[in-house]
Amino acid sequence: MKTRQIFNSLFLVVLFPLTLFAQVPVNKGYVLLYEEKFDGDKLNENDWKYRTDWRKGGNLNGYNRKENVSVSDGALHIAARYEMVDGQMQYTGGGIISKHQFGYGYYESLSRPFMDGKGVHTSFWQAGGSISNNNIFEIDSYEIDSKTSVGCNNLYIHFAPKKYGGYVPWPHRANVPFKLMEGGWLLDAYEYTPEGVIFYDNGVEVARAEWNELTAAQAVWLTALNGTGKVDVDKLPGESTFKYFRYYAKDYPGINILPNGDFEYNQDKTNPNKPVAWATKGTEKATLIVKGDAVRNEYKLRQGFETAYEVTSTQKLEYIMNGNYELTAMVKSSGGQINAQIKVSDFGGKEIAFDLKRNEKWTKITISNIKVSNNTVTITITSKGDGGEWLEIDDVNFMKPALPGQVVKKQEPLVLVGDPIWKLAMGSPINFKGDEKFYFFDRCVGRGDAMSVDFTVNAAEKANMTPVIRMPKTGNAGWAVQLTNKGGVLFRIGSVTDNFVVAAENAYTEGKDSRISCTFNKGTANIYANGKLLKTETGITKMTNDSTAAGRLGCVDGGFEAVGDVMVQLTPAEKESAKMKRFRGTLSKIKVYNREIHEKGSNCE
């Protein structure tokens, strides 16, 4: 079911034993553009498809089946079973994937994840889309492993140059304690904006992922995977239930809402003949992502071939706000083609076509007064010509014009993997209350012959706590930064069982911001506090080049580990062996480098 209405402040959800008031972020202009209430007795296959695949490897061994998904009593039911499939007993689960794609907005679902026994992984998330080459990012509103009380709120980037291994170090992987409401229900939501993602549990903000202008439109997934880690077979069959999914949008005047209009998302990782987010058809290899001589960043789109050709690259935006838009693009052309155009269609008005003439210098074109009235638009780049003729496009933008007097933030260069290698909480601090909340960061972060970690800490108490660590259990390579109950800092190099300790006194004060910087370079370690060098140690034989341990900050008590892409809860004995004080306070401006940073005044970098 699709509805369009202005959402002012509160809405009421009535469930059988449960009455719940939930609040979309107030005063932000959100409009409800899509709602799936799972009415009737079968899945709405106009809007959704079944997830059917094997998940094997690492800590996963489950089979997702259409037969495990059903609709009844105003809800989506995803069964988790241990059953005979093709002559073998298998752990089975399932899920659904939207056939529509959604961009910037507020996403919300009310669900009841299976929690009776271990082994089922329930999630509400966004990734991929209606075309095969639309894998831009993954936003996990929640990932919950049954029988655990900590859920993952994640942002992963799925494109990067080959020199970085083809992926971006986990930008954001928050693990947040949650409480289910009466009847086992969880109201979960995330707000995807040009500045990043804000995560909500039961109407309360729990985490933020900062990323500038990560523009995409992708599908929504509601899933329950079985066979995750150790499975309590005696608790099966069971099910995860979803009552509804809602999508709200708002206006972003002066902000581009067209994904990959600068053609950077392929990098050198994805087939250059298939621009990410665009559906391409026509002469094979006549569409090409080219590096160099781009208007913005590094890449551009080229249409043309050595013989006669005809191609189109099309992108459809769904569930966008109605109103007046404009399209701009930078173009170059050899001229002479039978046809070379940018077209705007399917927006509720007459198709608009802009003919592209010969011009061998980058030229800006503008299509104004595109009056969208059906929450949809299709943008097509097309050309047809003889061998040797060509058309080049870059920096395509589709947006509502900026408001009078509005200051529009300048578009920044795209930086996928930079220096620092990882950063977090640059805009606002993360508050840790001494519970199980923590953040994972990637194994490639703070790794090598040299590394540095730099952050601002405001400790709620003087205690023996570990704000940040990337250290394996055994071996001689890893690192950790700890606070002491006397206001000192310990910089440990090595593993949990075998490490060298660099100690500095008078490094932080309870209840006040203190900037801590720890550096290591081939046997020499330094500790800085608030721009002052407090301690140097040389001749250290331990290293920081471990590649097995994921990093953590916040709750560092050994309660969970990352195994592949799955969070695994440790046994009580394992917890006890790694037990330490949970951090209480705030962490902000966290930066980790794969090099040594150097002091410059009070900045230590």
Image: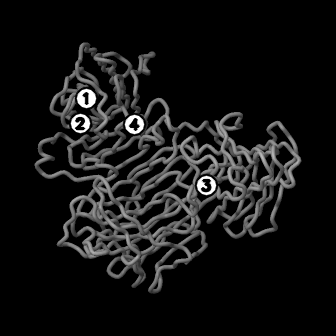
Q: Would you say residue 22 is visible in this rendering?
A: no
SS for tag 1? loop
Observer-nearest residue: 72 or 282? 282
Q: Is 547 situated left or right of 281 in this image?
A: left
Disc 2 residue type (three-letter): Pro
- Mark 4 or 1, nearer chain start: 1
Which residue position is annotated with label 2? 472
Task: Determine the residue positioned at 81% across, 41% down.
Answer: 363
Residue 210 picture location, percent across and down: 48, 44
Between discs 3 and 2, the one toward the N terminus: 3
Counting residues from the start of the chain, the first of labels 1 and 3 encountered is 3
Of labels 2 and 1, earlier in sequence is: 2
**Which corner quadrant of the image does residue 354 belong to?**
bottom right
- x and y percent of residue 14 in the render? 41, 79
**Where residue 165 is drawn, which disc sits there?**
none
Residue 575 position within the rendered picture, expressed as x and y whole percent measured from the top left: 15, 47
Which residue does the numbered mark 3 point to in the structure image? 277
Q: Earlier in the sequence, mark 4 or mark 3?
A: 3
